[in-house]
Image (tube, coloured by chain):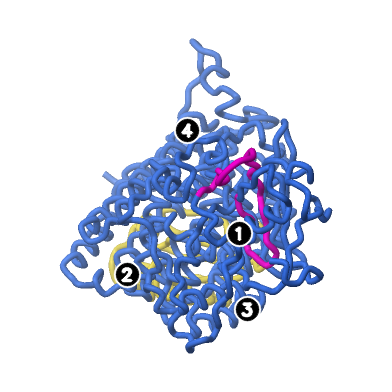
Chain colours: A blue, B yellow
Amino acid sequence: MARLPREEWYDIARDVDWDLSYVDYDEVFPEWMSGTGKVPREAWAEWDEPYKVTYPEYVATQREKETGAYSVKAVLRKSRVFDQLDEGWKSVAKQHFGAVALVEDLAAYAELRMARFGLAPAWRNMAVFGALDETRHAQISLYFPHELLGRDPQYDWAHKAYHTSQWTVAAARATFDGMMMNPNVVDVAVQLPFTFETGFTNVQFVALAADALESGDINFANMISSIQTDEARHSQQGGPTLKILVEHDPRRAQWVIDKTFWVSARLFSVLTGPAMDYYTPLAMRKQSFKEFMLEWVAGQFADQLQDYGLKKPWYWDEFLAGLDTWHHGLHLGVWYWRPTVWWNPQGGVSPAERDWLREKYPDWEDRFGPIWDVIIGNINAGQAGLTLPATLPWLCSLCQLPVGTAGSPGNQRYPVRSYPLSYDGRTYHFCSRPCRQIWWEDRDTLHSPTVVDRVLAGEVQPPTVEGLLTWMGLTPEVRGTDAYGYRWARAYPPGDPGPAGDAGPAGDAGPAVTEPSNGGRPVPVNALFAGDFVTQLVTLQDTDTVDQAASRIAAQVVGRRVRSREAGLVVRLGGRVLPGELTVAAAGIGPLDSVDVSWDAGRVGER
Amino acid sequence: MSGRVGPVLRMSDDVDAIVAAIEDDNPGQQVTVVDRGAYTRVSGEGELRVTRASIERHLGREFEMRQFEELMSAFAGRIEMTSQEVRWQLGG
């Protein structure tokens, strides 16, 4: 019997729906889940997916994909390919597995929410395939690293990461909960399939595959590009939803895209940026992170927005400028705070790598070179201890990434600073104006405290770096170390760059993150030392003099990331210079304030 | 706005045949091919299509259009897929 071509029956089968008679429509599709908003209910009947697939086709295709991915893995298992992989590259995969595997599982729930509450039968049908896809992705992303457990305990974090509140996981969880779990399904479709899956995942799953293959990690390249073939299909739930939403409520469509794009861009700067520009061995890099982002996100996604009659987000110039700086600051942060991650970051600033960075990013040397010089000097002077953290960077209340990393040192337009906001009796700190604005608009639906918030609330005991590592689930054998054992830094000629000088008068300020050593009441502040790339949590005492407070803050930075100088220090609060002899309390410094410390050329030698 | 559309093909033995089929199916179009190892970006201005018939001719075997999904890890533009062809376009 001849089979009908799919086109001749598909639409009828797909649109099978029923009229509810025993229950109210609003009970079955409640607004808080289905989110039709200003869109008339009947408008959803026009929902038409561009990428059509039937269930038998789906099953046949997925079977073939799985056979391909697993047969490559089976062959490679018997080879020595894994042993020959570069340690820096292995960290790309370790980071990926931990950061992504269980997000795939979360995405299955997001798809299932659309499969249940989506307002058109065609949409619900497509979301069922999406849920099956994401289940496959979670399984394959757990199965591939599982066989490596015996070789390296860091692979355990493929499964463990999302069961912890490690800080990058907390950041990712906040972002993905906001994208997949908290919103109604119309917003989910615009945020997840449209903005995230057609905009960003391509950079991690397709572009990164190019670096993976070049680095010899055939298995990983094969796995992620296989996963993305599913995404190319189910991400097409975004377009039809967006088309209807734009027609009836373009403001909502634009806003939902704008906010998702921003937090995604921030998150990918810590996930994909360091992987491409630092961890991937120099000779194997296909393009820079910026070049991949311009190809996949700035170019391809911006075309798509215009095609749907939408504008580029209001912060577009700031986003583009960030492609030159964000991920460099985040790499520096991840490397400096390396015991807090489950992979081994490759420093990636050898003379040859540095030349590449300067070529790809002409401002890199001015922005980040001086800090790396202090680090390199300390490593080569046998003081690697000064390249390890004694406190925490302050984390943005929206993206949960270190405050300062949406700017860069020496950058007039986007400086290293906090963008604070007082609300409901407390001060919140943000890395950027867009993060602050998004938080303000969405504040009633955001309930994810940052790791800094948790420390300040007393959840981390003892409140020391060691206590924090344990609280984040980082057992000693998985804590990150430099992937190359500092080999990259030793490539510099002896004495160049030179030692950074003393670590400051309170260089032994101790490991306590929140509790001052004696007396007084603790005053945790968000402290910036001029020339540094992040702001940090430093706990002062209200009985400290302002000069003592300056020393406590300097001790976390000077000789560590900023070269020591023969100069005094000046403290500013809200731009106002504070007299050094006043106490913290008398000077008006309160908990969660932004405190700036800089060199004072007029007070030479007072330190 | 660049206006370029088309598939991004993942690494496989069939990439050359697909590219040849796309070139056949888009006479008069300047088809650009960028090979980055693990992926190959094929693009044209405004609209690009590929048919099952051309793919079968270049592969020298039967091909179901659904199998195109296994080869394509991403694409630029809006897609439309039938059992006989795939089409990518912008401004449609």
Name the amino acid, label 4.
Answer: Arg
Which is closer to the viewer, label 4 or label 3? 3
Q: Is A57 displayed left or right of A373 in the figure?
A: left
Specify the quadrant of the image occupied by residue A152.
bottom left
- Please tell me whether mark 4 sits on a helix, a strand or a loop: helix
> To which residue does mark 3 refer?
A365
Residue where numbered disc 2 is placed: A217
Circle 1 SS class: helix
- Kindly tell me whether residue A17 is visible in this rendering: yes
Q: Disc 2 marks which amino acid? A: Asp
Residue closest to the eye, A512 or A561: A512
In the image, the segment drawn in magenta is: A512-537
| Residue A570 in the image, given as x and y percentages of width and height | 76, 61
Q: Is residue A51 magenta?
A: no
Please provide percent x and percent y for residue A195.
58, 50
**Of helix, strand and loop, which mostly describes the magenta segment?**
loop
Residue corresponding to mark 1: A301
**Relative to A322, residue A231 above or below:** above
